[in-house]
Amino acid sequence: MNNYYITTPIYYVNDKPHIGHAYTSLACDILARFKRLDGFDVHFLTGTDEHGQKVEKSAQAKNINPQEFTDNVSQNFRDLADLMNFSNDDFIRTTENRHKQACQKLWQELEKNGHIYLDKYSGWYSVRDEAYYTESELIDKDGKKLAPTGAEVEWVEEESYFFDLSKWQDKLLKLYDENPDFIAPKSRRNEVISFVKDGLKDLSVSRTAFSWGVKVPNNDKHIMYVWVDALTNYLTTLGYPDEKNKKFEKYWGADLHMVGKDIIRFHAVYWPALLMASGLDLPKRIFAHGWWTNEGEKISKSLGNVIDPVDLVEKYGLDQTRYFLMREISFGNDGDFSRQAMISRTNSDLANDIGNFCQRSLSMVFKNCESIIPNPNLNDGDNEIINNAKQCLETVRLNLDKQEFNKALESIWKIVGQANKYVDDNAPWALKNTDLDRMGTVLYTCGELIRIFGILLQPFIPNSASKMLDLIAIPEEQRTFKNINNSLQSGVKIDKPQVIFPRYVEQDDG
RNA sequence: GGCUGUAUAGCUCAGUUGGUUAGAGCACUCGCUUCAUACGUGAGGGGUCAUAAGUUCAAAUCUUAUUACAGCCA
């Protein structure tokens, strides 16, 4: 019952990992971690898309075989996962045997059910985009025909298999209608619906112009179209085609396919159609998030303003980067990365608000309570703020079920603000001279708040959250959400508090 | 060209079914505090809610038009 299967798209290995990849996977990582702490059995999948003509050509250019090439570049994405502390349970590569088997089985099912037929395809083909364009879509530039994306096109006539997508229009519209949350956010849902309403053409699902791909069963001339190959990865990881195996039974259909807004159509139109045609269950939800701009400008290779997650982590810190990406903008919208905003989040929210709260409370415990968490005598006010903090879990849970990461963090920080006010109102430094028992209770309450904040923040900023919990000596097994209603134990000795979120200080180089 | 959205404080945005003086964070000004990472806290200034017309006892919220921007499609 309590299973949760979440996926990132598989990333095309020909690209270098950038902030967009990190962002998609980060969102999934937070949801995966949250669900695990909330008692779910989680399967979190990411991976790399390694086929296609571009990969074949890149490998040729380097004079190595494509497999060797993808072995190398795929590693960049596994490195990114390590760097960003992603907790994926599997990392799929489309060049793996298990994946080829899955693709071929899915194909056979489609064929068996009569949804695939062989025909001829002719049209303007772009190698770069791996897509066909109609005459009317092309742009004329200096007498040369170019794809709308600016890529070169060539007239190609080839034999191709087709998937009868046109027959699925009504069923898809019914699906969207009956499941209002199937596509999120709303704006993307509208787009997809209007796209489907405009009418669907059968989809060319094989290629003969190159060979680096999954072979079509019983016809070696053809390899599968990129999206049939790529989308199937969501099944591969669960052991498909063995539908009787435990993983498949447990996790399929996926609870959430997280995608960037550029590939919503493949996930919200083609994928459900392919699944329905092959008799498989459908995923429950597709969420398309927005894109980042850099200091207000669109990010593009030609502008040279691509943001490398490695740079961010090195410069601002891992959890600072994770926090910023999730806190700064509402998920689903585009967002702007600016140096100033990044620094402001790092210093205001992390260093000042929560970091300093931990530091000011625990320093007093360290200096005035012989480093021992005091015995409390809680009054209504103390209990109130502790309960507010505990109840925050429910808010965060509701927010995350809708992928509202920024609201979740906002609700935690609201309590952090209350916590700092609590310290000011109760002024334990004054109680030091007048009422040691009361001082102890106030400091205990602060410790309890640190415990709750630490537990709540684990999905977002796992390293820092675990440092927070370490500071007050919370045992590993008492850090799940079930434990949030426990109480901080008195009499436990703590170490000298360490700064968790250092302030970011401007470097001379600007 | 068609469709769908967006337009609210200097900046980034929230504003549920129309209902009292339009909210938050950052930035700014002034007070308080000194435990803490020069950190915290309180108060304050700042908005003709894109423009115009309309519906209504009442509009940031509904309708229409215009302008700007974004996305999707062609």
Image (cartoon, rainbow, N blue to C red):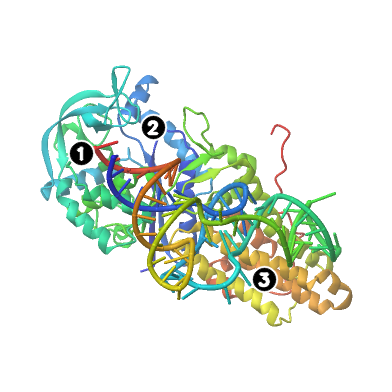
Q: Is residue A270 left or right of residue A326?
A: left
Q: Is residue A344 left or right of residue B74?
A: right
**Residue A202 sits above or below residue A328 on the image:** above
Where is mark 3, residue-wise? A448
Pointer 3 or 1: first along the chain: 1
Foreground disc of the pair 2, 1? 1
Q: Is residue A381 left or right of residue A69?
A: right
**What residue type is disc 2 on?**
Thr
Secondary structure of the residue carrying numbered label 3: helix
Secondary structure of the residue carrying numbered label 2: helix
Where is mark 1, residue-wise? A205
Check residue A438 in the rendering and tell me which mark sits there, or answer none: none
**Residue A196 sits above or below residue A117 on the image:** below
Most foreground residue, A74 or A441: A441
Where is mark 2, residue-wise? A70
Q: Position of residue A166 (x, y in %)?
A: 16, 47
Dividing the image into 4 quarters, which one contains the C terminus of chain A?
Answer: top right
- Please report contact status of discs 2 and 1: CB closer than 8 Å, yes or no: no
